C-alpha cells in the first residue's frame, strides 16, 4: 500500500513526465482546499484565496518538471510554489494600491468641471487651506499638485523615502477633503 506522501510524489512525477491529467486532478483535489485555507488567512478574501489556488496549481502544472523526489517531499515543493505565488499576489496588491492612490485622491483637488479651479478666488481658497497644513504635508502637496513634480522627484528633493512622501500626501489630502468638504460637496 502506497503512503499519501508517495502517492503525491508519484502524481507530481507523472504530471512532469507524462502531463498526466488524472494525476494532476489528484494533486488538485489534495492541495486546493489547503491552499484555499492558507489564502483565506493570508488575504481575508475568498476571491483572492481562489486566485491563489489557481495561480499555485497552474504553476505546479507548468513547473512540475522542476520537482525532484530525491530532494524533498511533494508537499514541501507545492507549498513552496504556493508561498511564492502568495508573495507575488501581495506584491501585486501593494503595487495596485500605490497605483490607485493618486487616482483615488486626485478628485479631491479637481472638480468634475475643470474650469472651476481656473477661477482666481477658488484657487485662493484652495491655497488658503493648503497653507493650514503642517509644513511637511504642505511641501508635498505644493510640489506634486502645483509644481507638477512626481512623487519620486518630491522624495528626492526632500531627501525622504518615497513611502514618506506618499504618507504625507495621503494625510494632507484627507485634511484638505475635510477643510473643503462643506464648501464643495
Image (tube, rainbow, N blue to C red):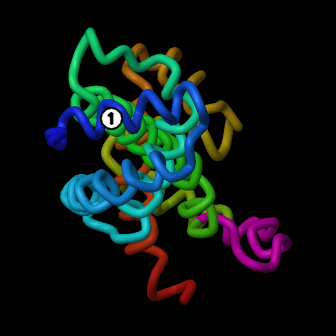
Q: Position of residue 74 (x, y in %)?
A: 28, 30
Q: Position of residue 10 (x, y in %)?
A: 35, 32
Looking at the image, which is closer to me, 170 or 1?
Answer: 1
Q: Is residue 123 left or right of residue 152?
A: right
Residue 131 vs 110, above or below: the answer is above
- SS state under label 1: helix
Q: How many marks?
A: 1
Task: State the residue position of label 1.
Answer: 78
The residue that appears at 22% across and 25% down in the rendered structure is: 73
Residue 162 vs 79, above or below: the answer is above
Answer few, some or many: residues within 10 Å of disc 1's Cα (few below 14, many 20 plus, some between 14 and 19).
many
Q: Is residue 99 visible?
A: yes
The residue that appears at 49% across and 54% down in the rendered structure is: 54
Looking at the image, which is closer to me, 10 or 53?
Answer: 10
The residue that appears at 51% across and 35% down in the rendered structure is: 15
Q: Quadrant of residue 88?
A: top left
Q: Verify whether residue 168 appears in magenta.
A: no
Q: Verify whether residue 111 appears in magenta.
A: yes
Q: Position of residue 102 (x, y in %)?
A: 58, 52
Looking at the image, which is closer to me, 20 or 49?
Answer: 20
Quadrant position of the N terminus in the picture = top left
Q: Residue furthest front?
A: 1
Quadrant position of the C terminus in the picture = bottom right
Q: Residue furthest right?
A: 115
Q: Position of residue 147 (x, y in %)?
A: 68, 35
Give the residues in magenta.
109-122
Residue 181 vs 42, above or below: the answer is below
Amino acid at each position: 500500500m502506497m503512503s499519501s506522501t508517495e502517492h503525491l510524489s508519484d502524481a507530481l512525477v507523472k504530471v512532469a513526465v507524462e502531463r498526466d491529467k488524472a494525476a494532476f486532478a489528484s494533486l488538485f483535489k489534495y492541495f486546493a482546499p489547503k491552499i484555499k485555507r492558507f489564502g483565506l488567512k493570508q488575504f481575508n478574501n475568498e476571491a483572492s484565496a481562489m486566485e491563489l489556488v489557481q495561480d499555485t496549481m497552474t504553476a505546479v502544472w507548468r513547473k512540475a518538471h522542476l520537482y525532484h523526489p530525491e530532494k524533498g517531499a511533494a508537499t514541501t515543493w507545492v507549498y513552496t510554489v504556493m508561498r511564492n505565488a502568495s508573495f507575488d499576489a501581495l506584491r501585486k496588491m501593494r503595487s495596485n494600491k500605490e497605483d490607485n492612490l493618486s487616482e483615488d485622491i486626485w478628485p479631491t483637488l479637481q472638480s468634475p468641471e475643470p474650469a472651476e479651479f481656473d477661477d482666481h478666488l477658488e484657487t485662493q481658497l484652495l491655497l488658503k487651506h493648503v497653507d493650514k497644513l503642517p509644513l511637511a504635508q504642505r511641501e508635498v502637496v505644493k510640489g506634486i499638485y502645483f509644481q507638477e513634480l512626481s512623487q519620486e522627484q518630491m522624495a528626492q528633493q526632500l531627501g525622504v523615502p518615497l513611502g514618506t512622501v506618499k504618507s504625507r500626501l495621503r494625510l494632507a489630502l484627507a485634511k484638505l477633503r475635510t477643510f473643503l468638504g462643506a464648501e464643495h460637496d
